[in-house]
Image (cartoon, helix red, strand yellow):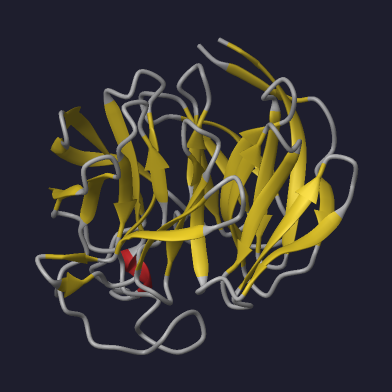
Amino acid sequence: MHSIQQEGPLERLCSPAIWAEGPVWLPEQDAVVFSDVKGNRMFRWTRSGALSLWRSASHYANGNARDAEGRVVSCEHGRRGISRTGRGGEVTLLVDRIDGKRFNSPNDLVVRRDGTLWFTDPPYGITGDDEGYKSESQVIGCYLYCFDPRDGSLNIAACDLQRPNGLAFSPDESRLYVADMSIVDFPTHGRRELRVYQVAGRQLEGGRHFARVAPGFPDGLCVDASGVIYCSCADGVILFDPSGQTIGKIAVPERVSNCTFGGPDGNELYITATTSLYRVRLATRG
């Protein structure tokens, strides 16, 4: 059994965005960096309360993560690839195509402990010009990829998703949870679910339905050290235990896009929702 208690009220920390996404906690800076996808920029909020513009233009960056060396890796809709920001601020485009074909618009990513980057590639950055550049798909499908920045190797890890979005590993990295929000494009046949896969090297196996997410649909998610999944929905963050049972909900007054853990003790949940960055302090006991 898991017991998750909210230790304090939900706090709205700032509201600078058109569509806030991709929060990533940077412990060295005691700060959160997050994207404003539609604003084509990124912001940095410190725990002292200071808000600053981190990057503009951001190539319509969406999801972000921190690698083992403390660098920020980002999904860029504009350049249709994955970039990495070095400690000195230099930005390197790591990968933007497979077999010469450009990705759709990488959306969210996670870094595995072995250094590989796992990312989803739905079409939302190429279907219009509000969060990217309208273009035709070159790869046709919406796949989940695994990329190793050390040697440049890339593979399709899963191809049975309709509109893959947020993703997060279980604590032991034996499972990968992936949001599929194809209900947006296929109102009568699409999915509004979390799917779960077994990780087998750099491939995913045994993909299956894990949990239905409503109201709205799943977008970004994160997993705590006890295996509880925190998943975005239309009016908050839903909590699921590792068996897929709903065990709680954090209500948020704007549509939630993503969330991540941070703070000195790792017990602060940072939530991006429409225009704003929120925080709630949690006490978790396994």
- Residue 27 image-quadrant placement: top right
Q: Position of residue 79 (x, y in %)?
A: 39, 74
- In the picture, measured across the screen, residue 162 lies left or right of residue 15, that is left
- In the picture, measured across the screen, residue 6 lies left or right of residue 83, that is right
Q: Is residue 230 above or below residue 191?
A: above
Q: Position of residue 222 (x, y in %)?
A: 50, 37
Q: Residue at x 65, y 38 (%)?
A: 26
- Residue 37 image-quadrant placement: bottom right
Image quadrant in which the C terminus is located: top right
Q: Position of residue 45 (x, y in %)?
A: 78, 51
Q: Residue at x 35, y 63 (%)?
A: 106
Q: Between residue 150 and residue 229, name the one nearer to us.
A: 150
Q: Between residue 118 and residue 251, name the one nearer to us.
A: 118
Asked whether residue 194 is in view, the answer is no
Q: Position of residue 215 (x, y in %)?
A: 52, 57
Q: Is residue 199 above or below residue 275?
A: above
Q: Residue at x 23, y 68 (%)?
A: 189
Q: Between residue 144 and residue 249, name the one nearer to us.
A: 144
Asked whether residue 181 is in view, the answer is yes
Q: Residue at x 58, y 77 (%)?
A: 38
Q: Between residue 70 and residue 145, name the one nearer to us.
A: 70
